Amino acid sequence: MAIAAAHEEPPADDVLTRVHREEHSRLLATLVRRFGDLELAEDAAQEAMESALRTWPRQGVPERPLAWLTTAAKRVALDRVRRDATYARRLAELHVAEEAAATPPADADVLADGDLPDERLAMLMGCCHPAIAPADRITLMLRFVGSLSTAEIAQALLVPVATLQARITRAKKRIAANRIPLTVPADPADRERRLPLVLTAISLIFTEGYAATSGDAPIRQELTAEAIRLARITHGLLPSAAEPQGLLGLLLLADARSPARQDADGVPIPLEDQDRSRWDRDLLAEGLALAEGAAGRPDAGRFTIQAAIAAVHAEAARYEDTDWPQILSLYDLLLARGEDPVVRMNRAIAVGRARGPQEGLALLEGLADDPELARHHPFHIAVALFRDEVGRREEAAAAWARALEQVDNAAEQRFIERRLAESEGSTSTARD
């Protein structure tokens, strides 16, 4: 494999960091497909990364870093298989199982011709195997397909980090003990049964990219792009189903706002302050068409409803023109499909915009004892904003401070610090 000259490439550790961030899930999924063992794939990927850290600074960064890592990881895994009878037996059993399942699925034409350009969707579907505990499935998807850290998953699911660590360990043991295949089921009906969790995982991957829980930047474009890619594939697999279409529409409508979502310093700009002329018109048009089409299907569910909410925002020329009563009705539809503290929080915000900040604030403060929302910094931001609007400045400053305690992203911290300083300044002025 050709090696680029060191002086023509970015530093090796920078390239490796980027490859790990953007392509680790592809590497892992490739190894799982080849060797049928998640733990072996993890170990091989890690050793390949460590080998790159030793080799690339001396020899230069390969022209195709991911291909280099894949080759190195396969060599590590094959060496382990040769030395370990257990791994060798598992690999042999995997090949026998693949040959036994050689009958093409009912919709083989959908799966052909590049519709599955890599194995990450297979990993998503495999992680939803019914033998894996329901609470563990989405954790696995976010960890091994979304490549999110344990802390990021904990934030996304609003659970303690220790709980996430236990789930990952438990699920990996179950996969190994039960020889669970991490593949796309051949039966279309089986794929459809696993679909809701797959869509939820894709949504959470996008959410982490759209509002990063850690790091310096508010947006992780590699994650939003990956989530949109997976949503497109899933919609292609089930083109007549409402929810994959609704999810894709939702993600495109949200992603369309990205050009207007941060200022020159990289600090987030809230929806009400965004320059809507900077929104991506092509993404808006595609997202609106998908959302409208999904809404007309009889199996429309929560992602289709969320897409409809995003469409209402997209159709408003100005924030002041937003049809908040319609958004409130849509949040009521969401809550009718199941209790969700974040949905209830967003409904309270919609009430505040449709009926006045006092009423919205009262609903938000009624949610203050919810343990999930207590760890959710957007909840404290919403409380702070409404308290500022109704003139409760000192309490608003306390809510801004509470939000700051709950956030790890540097850009988000700067945004909250600005608003906290403004709130504290208003309090001082009022006292004077």
Image (tube, rainbow, N blue to C red):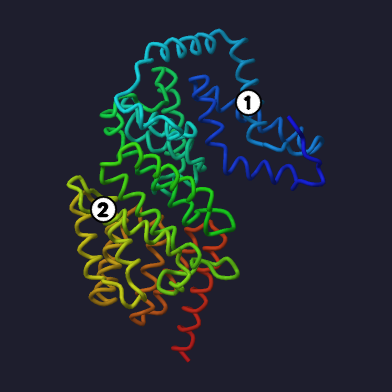
Residue at image point 61% right, 16% down: 78
Q: Residue at x 47, y 68 (%)?
A: 401
Element type at mark 2: helix
Q: In the displayed orientation, state which residue is furthest to the bottom.
A: 432
Residue 166 visible at all: no
Asked whether 416 or 129 is in front, the reply is 129
On the question of residue 216 being in view, the answer is: yes
Mark number, residue 293: 2
Up/down of 283 relative to 185, above or below: below
Q: Are marks 2 and 1 in contact (CB under 8 Å)?
A: no
Image point (61%, 22%), residue name: 74
Query: Which residue has dot 1 on it?
Result: 73
Question: Which mark, by number, is residue 100?
Answer: none
Q: CA distance from mark 2 to mark 1?
A: 43 Å
Disc 1, SS: helix
Residue 189 horizontal/vertical position (percent): 25, 29
Image quarter in which the N terminus is found: top right
